[in-house]
Image (tube, rainbow, N blue to C red):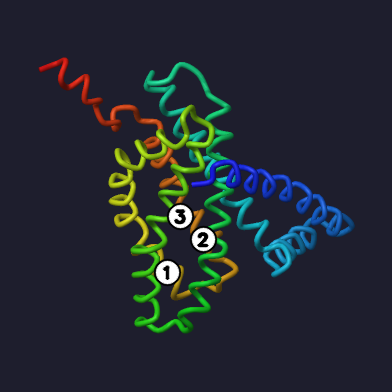
Amino acid sequence: MDCVATSSNTLQEMQSLGITWRKIATSVRASGPVSHFKRILKVAFSDKYLFYTNVTISMGLSSLGDICEQHYEIYIDQQEKFDIKRTMHMAFSGVAVGVLCHNWYKVLDKLIVGKTLDMVAKKLFLDQMVFSPIMIVTFFGSLALFEENPLENFKEEVKDKFVTLYRAEWMVWPPAQIVNFYFLPTRYRVLYDNTISLGYDVYTSQVKHNKSLKSIPKDSKNGSS
């Protein structure tokens, strides 16, 4: 895993988001409130800006999920105060995941054309068996960039927590993705995906920062026996 290249590419995407949304705001500023909103939606989900819209949605809801989880941890005295860096790291991870989701749905809809139940089943199978593991690995990999010994921490996180998140994926996404693949056009898939995943983002933040899921070092086991 090329951590430096991944970090650089994702930071560039985050910078591009700010520039793009300033352009969108400029292009719709002259409209009235209602037409202003409609034009924003039309421009945001156009082919030209869809990538930036999807990445922004993923970044925003990943941040919101962590904010909700942190406030809960503070409420139950599991955490002393709000950690803004943690939320920023989750936002960074959301950008990486958003890039993947945007391109995955485009590829999937080109690879399997149609909305019959057979086509939906094939998409669902590929989504769960191929893309879900990639997403989980990307999630841990993007956050490991901010930790000491990124590669070692990445390997440890995947070893200790991959199965926990993958099991949760099977509980949440098969029924949700049936609706996504059968009813929605490609341009709205990431929006729907992230709306459904807000609760899941809270859970991923909890799993990521739950120290009790880490395996006990061998030395500790030997020392306690």
Write the residue at 17% across / 22% down. Answer: 221
Within 10 Å of disc 1 (Cα), the crowding (few <14, some 14-19, many 20+) is: few
Query: In whole angstroms, how far apart are the C-alphas of marks 3 and 2?
Result: 6 Å
The image's mark for residue 192 is 2
Q: Is mark 1 on a helix, strand or loop?
A: helix
* Rendering quarter of residue 162: top left
Residue identified by numbered label 1 = 179
Quarter in which the C terminus is drawn: top left
Residue identified by numbered label 3 = 196
Residue 6 in the image: state x and y as whole percent: 58, 46
Residue 119 in the image: state x and y as whole percent: 39, 81
Camera-nearest residue between 159 and 69: 159
Three-letter code, disc 3 = Ile
Please determine whether, in this image, residue 68 is positioned above or below residue 172. above
Three-letter code, disc 1 = Val
Q: What element carries label 3?
A: helix
Residue 128 in the image: state x and y as whole percent: 35, 63
Q: Are marks 3 and 2 in contact (CB under 8 Å)?
A: yes
Three-letter code, disc 2 = Tyr
For the view shown, which residue lies furthest in the front direction? 2
Q: Do the residues labelled 1 and 2 touch (CB within 8 Å)?
A: yes
